[in-house]
Image (spheres, rainbow, N blue to C red):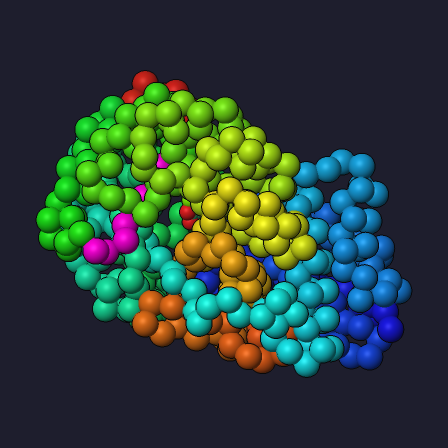
Amino acid sequence: MSILAADVIVTSPDRNFVTLKLTTTDGVIGLGDATLNGRELAVVSYLRDHVVQLLIGRDERNIEDTWQFLYRSAYWRRGPVTMAAIAAVDVALWDIKAKSAGMPLYQLLGGASREGLLAYGHASGRTNAELFESILEHRAQGFRAIRVQSGVPGLKAIYGIASNATSAGNAGVRYDHEPAQRGAQPVQEDWDTRSYLRHLPTVFEAVRNEFGPELPLLHDGHHRMTPIQAATLGKSLEPYDLFWLEDCTPAENQEALRLVRRHTTTPLAIGEIFNTVWDYQLLLREQLIDYVRSSVTHAGGITQLKKLLESAAQYQIKSGMHGPTDISPVGMAAAMHLGLAIHNFGIQEYMVHGARTNEVFEQTFTWRDGMLHPGDAPGLGVDLNVDEAGKYPYAQAYLPYNRLADGTMHDW
Ligand code: KDG
Ligand code: MG
């Protein structure tokens, strides 16, 4: 048995997705997500020009060896493009192995450790009134944990605030926030940290007053604060009992979290832009975080993320896998199988995909009472409808960027 064919499929039903499809000599198909939001074609080229020919003829059963081969033989290690490409191969191989074994992937990973995965959704509003409405909508959709993002007086457009737009031609689907905009240039947003630090605690106070103490609330700082600003925010949010404060400082400077940690008991989550287990060494060893935010898609697949989460478990650090719409249904399914199997699952981010996406990717997962479950079909439980995918060609799209009032570029 070996890999007969490896196809890279680019489709843009509601947004761009890159999928690797492996077919074995005995006809088993495995899928892997290789979507890197805003830089999709770089991963397509990495796979098509450098990896596909290395896979043909390989024994598809040797997942660990294939992972090590792709990682070490490239010489140029780590980075989002490389690790998304390796992840796609890895997940496709796990899909094949589980299908060949006739079991859902989570069974191969050790079986279910829980009945389902608590998932959080994205509520947002430019004002508290809009935000409350969005929280109510999420509760009506079944969400039992909610990320709160708010507009800031004086700022026109900032990360995480819904545009209230429904995706064109996709009636009925309302995106909470789809930051990547189709077009030839990225959109500029604005930022002012002092206004944000003043305003955000008032928002959380209002939300707690309205919705009570029980509802788990999360917030994403999206890398925009200095360490001392992040420490200030963590401290000022303590009365509102956050489930986590995410990406409070830029991810490159891991030592920054020492200072934040010294000043606040607000739980910290980081890692959606990390790619490897090595990015977490300091954070785990010094217990500077509470949740690992990496996705299967961007952190080298099941093989590596499982190892990383097992290392995290020894410090009582839990998973909080990244799950925006730019993780494809294939990547989400991989996250669900892994989250169901590991002991130290924390929470799963879940943004609902659009109707066209769900026609391209046929899925078996369930969403019930605020909990996700990947279903019990053999493998990942996702099929790619290639004809449907072919209707939606790639469309250039960029994530926005931030400038301060004086024009200085700032982290987005
Ligand atoms: O592609 C970038 C988005 O996935 C990211 O901005 C979303 O921060 C994000 C989150 O927490 O989902
Ligand atoms: Mg985030």
Residue at (64%, 50%) from the top-left corner?
307
Quadrant location of the N terminus? bottom right
Question: Which x, y percent locates residue 244?
Answer: 35, 44
Q: Residue at x 61, y 59 (%)?
A: 33
Highlighted range, magenta: 214-221
In this view, the residue in front, 79 or 240, is: 240
Left or right side of 154 for 171? right
Above or below, comparing residue 158 to residue 406 in the picture: below
Left or right: 397 with respect to 60?
left
Magenta stretch encompasses residue 371: no
Measuring from the top left, give residue 80's x and y in whole percent: 62, 42
Q: Is residue 1 left or right of residue 265?
A: right
Task: Examine the structure image and report whether residue 216 is included in the region drawn in magenta.
Answer: yes
State the image coordinates of residue 238 (x, y, percent, origin top left): 24, 36
Residue 97 is drawn in which quadrant? bottom right
Residue 1 makes an appearance in the image? yes
The quarter of the picture showing ligand 2? top left
The C terminus lies in quadrant: top left
